[in-house]
Amino acid sequence: MDIIAANHLTKSYRQYRRFPGLIGSVRSLFTRQFTEETAVNDISFTIGEGEAVGYLGPNGAGKSTMIKMMTGILVPTAGDIRVLGAVPHEARKTNARQIGVVFGQRSQLWWDLPVTDSFDLHKTIYQIPETKFKQNLQMCMELLSIHEFVEKPVRQLSLGQRMRVEIAMALLHEPRILFLDEPTIGLDVMAKDQIRHFLRMVNRERKVTILLTTHDMKDIEEICPRMIVVNKGTLVYDGSVEELRARLGNERRVVIDFREDPGPLDMPGITLLQEEGLRKTYLVSRSESTVFELVSRIAARYPVEDASIESADIESVIRRLYRQLADEESIGRQIG
Amino acid sequence: MTFQLFGQLVRLLMKEKMQYRGDFLLSAVAQIISYAGDYIVIYLFIKRFDTLAGWNWPEIALLYSIGLFTYALGASFSFVQMSQLEGQVRQGTFDTLLIKPVNPYLYLVSRGFNLAYIAHITISGSVLVWAMLQLNLHWTWIQYIYLLIAIISGSMIHAGIMTMIGAMSFIWVRSSYLFSLFFQLKNFISYPLPVFGTVVQLLLTVVVPLGFVNFYPAAYLLDNDTALMPAWAMWLVPLAGPIVYGLGYRFWMFGANKYQGAGG
Ligand SMILES: Nc1ncnc2c1ncn2[C@@H]1O[C@H](COP(=O)(O)OP(=O)(O)OP(=O)(O)O)[C@@H](O)[C@H]1O
Ligand SMILES: [Mg+2]
């Protein structure tokens, strides 16, 4: 069953022109001049119960806007969106009980009070039965190691600790869908890992549907089998990571340790990505057998100590996709 | 929004405030001193003329106290909440209110319930009682009930107007000017309205109905002249509050649907 369905969904922001001062305020009320910006442009997709979907796109692509429409914060300009069968902004109260929302950049906790107070308040707001609350809290506190700082005021927590608390809180009422807008932003590797494992478990074992936005491709790799990529408001890809990799062709990274600096290599089809002393990383856009051939040709002509071929990680696949989108756009501009 | 939730919010708010209880007490004392100053200014002013538009000092003390008392009640549920809304809308932190399974308006006003108005309530309540004793009133229970209803209705007028101003944040994103305008107008109701002439009285009766907060009910209770309005207008007092507050609430909810958030 589809738990989320977006159908030709569009959101434009209207920015009203403001004039300074008291008279200006009155004037802006009556003139109402505005500029319009389309943040989400005619997007359609469906998400089934139990899926974990990564929502990707460069800065300003309209990811947060999409999450805000799905959670009922914003009212769409055109098209329609259904979450759990209802229109989110019309069914805010009923939907809110069944969804959990985490904003990486906005806290929902009480800054000056211990973490437990925010949890208790959440219990009252969501009217969670005592036993269910205790059970879920126990589980989250254990898996996210929250015990150590649960009595500390929120303002004293580190960003990583706070984010773990935010995620735990979003799950206390057993939502069917969990929305996360950049949950790993600004966290260290350990904190990211813990959150990823936890979210993966929540999705696989507790069958909570997850939709998250991120700029960290490892989040997608670990949590989301499916990804949706948007750019400038329009949907550009919806499918699995593997498919995308296949579609963009096989791109390989080759790391070569030289015995001495060979200078720029005179070889077609390779680009230098990175240089750390005698270790250089190249990007090679060929199929696997020819990459191997290419490396042996380099070894024949230059003083190579060691070489390794890495398969393209998701990060470079995405980078490639973004670059391709930018190219298409500049071509479009030249023609149009 | 349930009473249980409201109770818990108040408990947390008190806990939060008590971490800075020095600040809290100090500002409460400062408020009381500043309003005591206001009373003294009015007293000195009246003393020179004996009466003002036919109102003597204890009567004006009663008038002013109802105005302040109702302001404090209304403002504890609306002033900080509504004046900070502009910032919350601009920064997009209002987002988090819309994802809770509670009415966002009721949650916002309860979450921001401001205990600091205890200072205003203490001083205006005391002066109100003092004035009533001074005036040697021979009221029946009807007048006492009427006073109670007028206080509730007056608080709703204050809260309703501030709610409307707050709702402008969603549409116009600059409510601070309107708040200062509101406080300018509110200054008028410290005195009997006829003092300021017909235009001001009409303005505060029809456009921004602050006259119903204290002037009309007090004039009725003290049997003073209301100038422009007929005697039956007294019965508009209990209606004015619910109407203004209801309109404010509607307008606010309408505004919330226009909320655009902030980038992020
Ligand atoms: N409240 C707003 N008013 C006007 N324009 C907005 C508003 N919020 C977002 N935008 C614009 O809409 C577009 C999409 O913004 P959005 O925040 O959805 O992007 P995003 O994909 O989440 O970006 P990021 O990765 O940087 O978080 C941007 O061009 C942004 O400037
Ligand atoms: Mg964003």
Image (tube, helix red, strand yellow):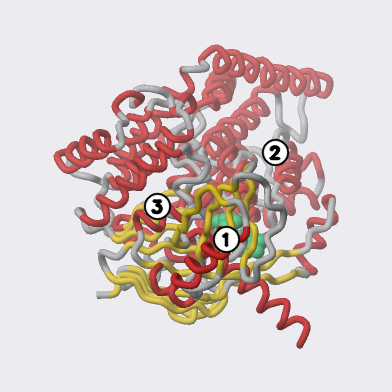
Quick check: do tags 3 and 2 share a chain?
Answer: no
Q: Which of the two marks, 1 or 2, is nearer to us in this view?
A: 1
Residue A112 as seen in the image, left or right of residue B66: left
**How far across and down, in percent of the image, does residue B156 sit?**
52, 45
The answer to whether residue B257 of the structure is visible from this angle is no
Task: First in sequence, mark 3 or 1: give its number.
Answer: 3
Q: Is mark 1 within 8 Å of ligand 1?
A: no
Badge 1 sits on which subunit?
A
Label 3 and label 2: CA atoms lie apart by 46 Å
Query: Crowding near pointer 2: few (<14 within 10 Å), some, many (20+)?
Result: many
Which residue position holds label 1?
A300
Could you say where residue A98 lies in the image, as x and y percent from the top left?
A: 29, 58
Q: Is residue A249 above or below residue A165?
A: below
Q: Residue furthest left?
A: A131
Q: Can residue A167 be seen from the camera position used here?
A: yes
Q: Chain of mark 3?
A: A
**Same chain shared by disc 1 and disc 2:** no
Q: Secondary structure at mark 2?
A: loop
Q: Which residue is mark 2?
A: B189
